[in-house]
C-alpha cells in the first residue's frame, strides 16, 4: 500500500515501505513543492535536489531521538513535510504555517532556527559533546551543502568535530553549486572526489579527521538508504558525501541552477517567472551599472562579493563583462573583508557588496583588517532596513550599531538613488577612509539635492529650514520625513528637515545652531534604536534643554513580520512622525 | 667578515653572507631577543622559534618589493631587527620604539597592523589579486603559525587563494603548538605530514588547491634558504610547511612551551619569572575555581575556550582536573559560540570564557546561533575595559555596543569579585537567557551588597541614596564613582550612586523615580560612549528635563596607551567624576 502524502504525521509513516512506494512519495513531494514554490516563491533548486536524501534520512534514522541539523535550511522543506507539517505544503490556507527555515517552535524535529550558512556542524558538534557527557547514544547528523563549506565556521566545526571520538555524521549535499557557481580551491577537491567515486587520494574531510563514504547516486533513495544504514550508530566522525542534482526533477531549474536557487512565483508548466515581466528600479541594478561604468573609467575598481552576486546586480553576463575585476570569494565574508583590505593596500579600489544580515559575519575583519589599517575599502551594505528580508535569521536592522561605532569607519546613508551613486563614486575615488554605504532595500522616488563631495565628514544637510522642530531622518526614512513635513506645514508648522547623510558621526555645529530657534528634535532611522544614530543625537543634547525623541526599531527579534505594520507600530511613517511631533508639542 | 647586529639597516645587509655568518647572526639575535624579552616581557616561544626562518626569508626574497605578511605577528621580532629596527631590540632606551606587532607606521617592510590570528592569508591574497590586476611580478608571502590554521578566516583565505593562478607562497610555521596544545583534526594531519616528511597521502593544503613543500629542519638556515629559493617566483600557490621548535635555543622555553608562549620579565640565566613570585587576586583564578567548584555540584557545567585557557585560569593541571568538561576548540571563536549553543540545547550549561577583543570574532554566531535560538549559553567576556590590553589590535572597549544591542542577550557588568561570582552562578543555573558577563581586567576591593538573583531583568541597585545628582557607574567604574561620591559628600553634596548591574537594558522605573528629587545624572562606563550604556540613559531622558552627562571612552583607536592617563583624560577617575558633577551644577 502506498504512502498518502497528506496523511503523513511523522517519519514513522514512511518506515517499512518499499523502495517503489518511497520513490512514488518523492514524486508526490516534488509536485507539492513545485506547486507551493510556484505560488509563494522560495528556494527551488536546493529543495528539489534533496527530496530523496531527506526520505532516506528519515527512513533510516529515528528523528527526533536521532538529531538532524540542517545547514542554512535551504533544503529542509521535505524534512518539514515528513515531520508533521505537510499541510503547510499542500494546503494553500496553511502555506504560511511553516517558515522557510528550520524552527524548533514548529516541531520537535527541528533543533535550531537557522538561516545563515555554515553553522550546522558547529551546532551539531555541541549536541554531540552534550550527548557524550551524558552518556547518550543517539546519532547526531549535520546536513550541509557544498556551497556552505567555504564558510569559516563550517571549517572550524569540521576541524573540531574531527577530534570527537564518538558518533558524528556529516552529510555533504554536493550539487556542485552555491547560489551561483562555487568559488574556492575546495571545490576542485570535491570534483576530484566525485569523479573518482570518492577514491581521490587527497581528501579534504580525511585531512580533518573524518572517515569518509561517497555516494554518487545522491537522488537514488535505495543507494542513500544503504549508505545511511551503513553509518548509523557509527562510533566515530564520518562524512557521507552525496552527489545530488540541484533542481532535480524540474528541467528549468536543472538547466539554470543559479536563477532557480531562489525564485519568486512562477508558472510550473512553462517555468515563466511572473516577476520577470515587470522590473522596478533596484539598487542591485544601479550598483552593477555603476561599478561596470567606473571600471571602464578607472582600472583600480574591483567588485568583491561573497556568493551573492545577484544582490549587487552581477548577473552571469555582467560577471563575464567584469572579468577578473569581479571577485566572488564563495560564502566567506571574512575572506571578502580581509582580501578587500589587501586589495586596497595593493592600490586597487575594492567595492564589497554584502547583505546587511551577512556583513555581521565579518565584524572582526572589518574592525581589524580594514578599520585599524585604514584601508580605503568601500562596503555596500545591501538591503539595509526593514523593507527587505523579513525572516528572523535575515533581519537587516543591526548594521548601524554594528558598524557605525567602529572607529575610523565613515558610514553613509543615502536617501535617494542619486545620492547613493554620488556617495559610491566619492567613496571609490577617495583613499583616506574605509567607507560603508547603507543601501536600502527599495528605491525611493524622493528628489533631494545631492553633493558630489563627502570629504567634509559628518556634515548634515538641511532639506528645508524651519523652526521649533527639526526632523533628522536617516537614508530611506527621509522619504516619510519629508511627507510628514508637508502634513505639518498644512497644519501650520514649519519643521526643519535634515538629511544627516553620515551615521558614524554628528554635525555638532548644525545641532548647536538648531538650539537658537528649535525646541525639539525628532530622529528617524530604519534600524534599531539601541546603539543607533538617534541615541548619538540624544546624547549630544543630553545636558542641554533641547527635547529629543528617537524613532526607530525596537531591540527584539521579529519573524516574518509585515513591513508596513512594523513601520506603523514604530511610527516610521509620515503619520507616525507627525504624531510624534504633535505629542512633543502638546 | 661577519654581520654586526647593531649595524643592520635593511635586509640587504645580510645578503651574500655565508651560512656560518648567518648562523652566527641567528645566535646574536637570539641573545638580543632574550635580553629584551627578559626585561620587557613578550612572546618568547614563537619569536625564538622563527629566527632562522626569518633570516632565510630575507636572504632569499627582496622585501619590501616582495611582500611578507605575518599572521598575528607573534613571530615578527627578527623581521623587525632585519628591517631597520634593531635599536628597539638592543638598546633599552629604544625598546619601546617597536610595538610587539607588525606596523606600517614603523617600516615599509610591514604591510598591516595585525594582532588577531588567522588573517595573513586573506590579507596577502588581496595583495596578490592587486598585483595580478596590475601585471606585477613580486612574490607575495604569508607567514602563518600552525595554531592560527584553526581559525575560519585562515581556511577561507587558503580556500580562496588556492584558486589563484599566480605566485602565492604560504609559509606554515609548524611548531606543534598554539598558545597551549593544539586542538582540531587538522593537527593530526600536520603531524602525519611531519612524520612522513611531507609525503602523507591526504594533504590538507593540497585539498585546497595548493602545491606543497615540506622542510623538516625548520631551524636550519641552509635548508630553509634552499627551500625558499626553490619556490621564489613560482607561478602558482604553494605551501612551504616548515617544522620549527617553539622556544628554540632557550631550554626553559622548549621544556614548557605553553608557559613561555608569552612571558612577563624573567631572569635569563635561571628562567625565573619575577611576576611568579607575587600573585594578586585575578579574575582568571576566580573563574577557574568557580567553574571547577560548580562542575562538582552540577554535572551539566562545561567550560569552553578558544585557545586561551590561561585567560580563564585553566592551567594544565586544572584542565586535567576538568577532564572532558573543559573543551578547548583551538583558535576558533565561531566554533566556540556555535558549539556552546549546541551544548546548551543538548542540556549542558556551557561557560565560554573569551577575551573582549576576541569575542568580536563571533558576533554573527552569538546573534544567530545563540541569541535567536535563545540557548542559555554563558559568555564570560574577559579583560573588558581599558585596564587590560593596550595594543591597538587588542583593545577591549567595544563589547558593550557589540553585544548589549543584540536582542534577547542579558549582559551583566559586575562591580566586584563577589558580584561576579554571584552573577556567574545565577547565569549557570537559569535556562531562560543567553547571558554575557563583562569581566574586568583587574579585581576591585570594593565592598557592595550582592544579589544572588538576577531574574528581575534590568533592575538597577542603589548603592547610596541622595538627591540632585545620580551617578550610574558600570562594573569596574563603580569603584571611582563611590570614591567620587565620598569626595562630593565632603563638599556638602549627597549624590545617589547606582550600580546598574545590567547593561543590556534600563531600569525605567528607577530612572523615572529619580526625576522626583534629581536634576542630573552622570553615567560612567569603561567602554566607548558610542552605542554604549550611557547613550541608552541619555535617550531615556531625552524628552524630559533631566540633564545627563555620559563619561566613557571616545570612539578612536589608541595604541600602547597609558591606562591611567586615559582614565584621567576621559574623567573615569574619582576626580574626573567630581569635576563632571560640579560642572553640571555650575
Image (spheres, coloured by chain):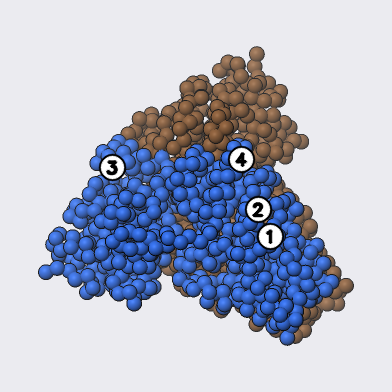
Chain colours: A blue, B brown
Q: CA distance from mark 3 to mark 1?
A: 51 Å
Instruction: Look at the picture and state if B77 lies above or below B575.
Output: above
Mark 3 = which residue? A194
Q: What residue appears at the point 25 percent right and 56 percent down from the top-left corner?
A: A249
Q: CA distance from mark 3 to mark 4?
A: 43 Å
Mark 4 = which residue? A297
- Residue under disc 3 on the same chain as residue under disc 4: yes
* Chain name for mark 1: A
Q: Is residue A54 visible?
A: no
- Residue under disc 3 on the same chain as residue under disc 1: yes
Q: Which quarter of the rendering shows the N terminus of chain A?
A: bottom left
Q: Earlier in the sequence, mark 2 or mark 1?
A: 2
- Give the number of the mark in front: 3 or 1: 1
- Residue A460 is situated, as x and y percent measured from the top left of the image, at 73, 61
- Give the number of the mark in front: 2 or 3: 2
Q: CA distance from mark 1 to mark 4?
A: 26 Å
Label 4 near label 1: C-beta < 8 Å? no
- Residue A49 is situated, as x and y percent measured from the top left of the image, at 29, 55
- Give the number of the mark in front: 2 or 4: 4
Mark 2 = which residue? A423
- Residue A158 is situated, as x and y percent measured from the top left of the image, at 38, 50
Label 1 near label 2: C-beta < 8 Å? yes
Image quadrant in which you'd find residue B443: bottom right
Q: What residue appears at the point 30 percent right and 66 percent down from the top-left corner?
A: A35
Q: Earlier in the sequence, mark 2 or mark 3?
A: 3
User: Which mark, by number, is residue B181?
Assistant: none
Amino acid at each position: 500500500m502506498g504512502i498518502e502524502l497528506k496523511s503523513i504525521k511523522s517519519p514513522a509513516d514512511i518506515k517499512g515501505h518499499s523502495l517503489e512506494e518511497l520513490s512514488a512519495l518523492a514524486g508526490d513531494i516534488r509536485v507539492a513543492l513545485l506547486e507551493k514554490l510556484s505560488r509563494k516563491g522560495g528556494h527551488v533548486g536546493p529543495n528539489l535536489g534533496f527530496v530523496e536524501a531527506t526520505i532516506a534520512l528519515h527512513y533510516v534514522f529515528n528523528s527526533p531521538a536521532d538529531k538532524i541539523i540542517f545547514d542554512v535550511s535551504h533544503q529542509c522543506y521535505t524534512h518539514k513535510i515528513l515531520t508533521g507539517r505537510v499541510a503547510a505544503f499542500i494546503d494553500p490556507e496553511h502555506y504560511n504555517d511553516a517558515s522557510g527555515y528550520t524552527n524548533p517552535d514548529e516541531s520537535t524535529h527541528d533543533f535550531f532556527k537557522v538561516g545563515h550558512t555554515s553553522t550546522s556542524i558547529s551546532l551539531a558538534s555541541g549536541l554531540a559533546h552534550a550527548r557524550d557527557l551524558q552518556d547518550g547514544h543517539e546519532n547526531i547528523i549535520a546536513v550541509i551543502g557544498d556551497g556552505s563549506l567555504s564558510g569559516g565556521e563550517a571549517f572550524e566545526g569540521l576541524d573540531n568535530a574531527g577530534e570527537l571520538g564518538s558518533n558524528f555524521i556529516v552529510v555533504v549535499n554536493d550539487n556542485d553549486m552555491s547560489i551561483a557557481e562555487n568559488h574556492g580551491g575546495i571545490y576542485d577537491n570535491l570534483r576530484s572526489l566525485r569523479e573518482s567515486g570518492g577514491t581521490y587520494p587527497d581528501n579534504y574531510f580525511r585531512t580533518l579527521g573524518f572517515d569518509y563514504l561517497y555516494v554518487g547516486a545522491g537522488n537514488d533513495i535505495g543507494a542513500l538508504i544503504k549508505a545511511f544504514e551503513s553509518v548509523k550508530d557509527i562510533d566515530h566522525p564520518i562524512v557521507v558525501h552525496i552527489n545530488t542534482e540541484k533542481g532535480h526533477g524540474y528541467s528549468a531549474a536543472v538547466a539554470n541552477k543559479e536563477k532557480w536557487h531562489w525564485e519568486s512565483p512562477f508558472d510550473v508548466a512553462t517555468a515563466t517567472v511572473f516577476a520577470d515581466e515587470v522590473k522596478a528600479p533596484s539598487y542591485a541594478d544601479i550598483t552593477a551599472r555603476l561599478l561596470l561604468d567606473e571600471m571602464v573609467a578607472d582600472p583600480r575598481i574591483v567588485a568583491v562579493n561573497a556568493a551573492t552576486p545577484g544582490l549587487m546586480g552581477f548577473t552571469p553576463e555582467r560577471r563575464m563583462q567584469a572579468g577578473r575585476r569581479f571577485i566572488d570569494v564563495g560564502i566567506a565574508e571574512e575572506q571578502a573583508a580581509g582580501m578587500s583590505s589587501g586589495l586596497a593596500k595593493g592600490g586597487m579600489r575594492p567595492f564589497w557588496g554584502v547583505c546587511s544580515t551577512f556583513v555581521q559575519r565579518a565584524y572582526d575583519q572589518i574592525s581589524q583588517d580594514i578599520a585599524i589599517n585604514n584601508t580605503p575599502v568601500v562596503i555596500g551594505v545591501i538591503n539595509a532596513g526593514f523593507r527587505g528580508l523579513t525572516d528572523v535569521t535575515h533581519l537587516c536592522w543591526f548594521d548601524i550599531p554594528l558598524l557605525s561605532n567602529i572607529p575610523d569607519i565613515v558610514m553613509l546613508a543615502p536617501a535617494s538613488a542619486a545620492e547613493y551613486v554620488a556617495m559610491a563614486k566619492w567613496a571609490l575615488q577617495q583613499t583616506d577612509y574605509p567607507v560603508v554605504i547603507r543601501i536600502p532595500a527599495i528605491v525611493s522616488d524622493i528628489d533631494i539635492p545631492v553633493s558630489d563631495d563627502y570629504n567634509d565628514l559628518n556634515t548634515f544637510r538641511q532639506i528645508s529650514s524651519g523652526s521649533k522642530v527639526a526632523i533628522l531622518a536617516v537614508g530611506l526614512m527621509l522619504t516619510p520625513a519629508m511627507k510628514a513635513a508637508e502634513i505639518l506645514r498644512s497644519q501650520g508648522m514649519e519643521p526643519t528637515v535634515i538629511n544627516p547623510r553620515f551615521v558614524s558621526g554628528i554635525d555638532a555645529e548644525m545641532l548647536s545652531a538648531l538650539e537658537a530657534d528649535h525646541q525639539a528634535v525628532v530622529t528617524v532611522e530604519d534600524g534599531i534604536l539601541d546603539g543607533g544614530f538617534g541615541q548619538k543625537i540624544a546624547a549630544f543634547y543630553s545636558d542641554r534643554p533641547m527635547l529629543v525623541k528617537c524613532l526607530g526599531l525596537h531591540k527584539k527579534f521579529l519573524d516574518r513580520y509585515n513591513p508596513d505594520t512594523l513601520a506603523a507600530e514604530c511610527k516610521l511613517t509620515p503619520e507616525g512622525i507627525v504624531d510624534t511631533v504633535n505629542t512633543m508639542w502638546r
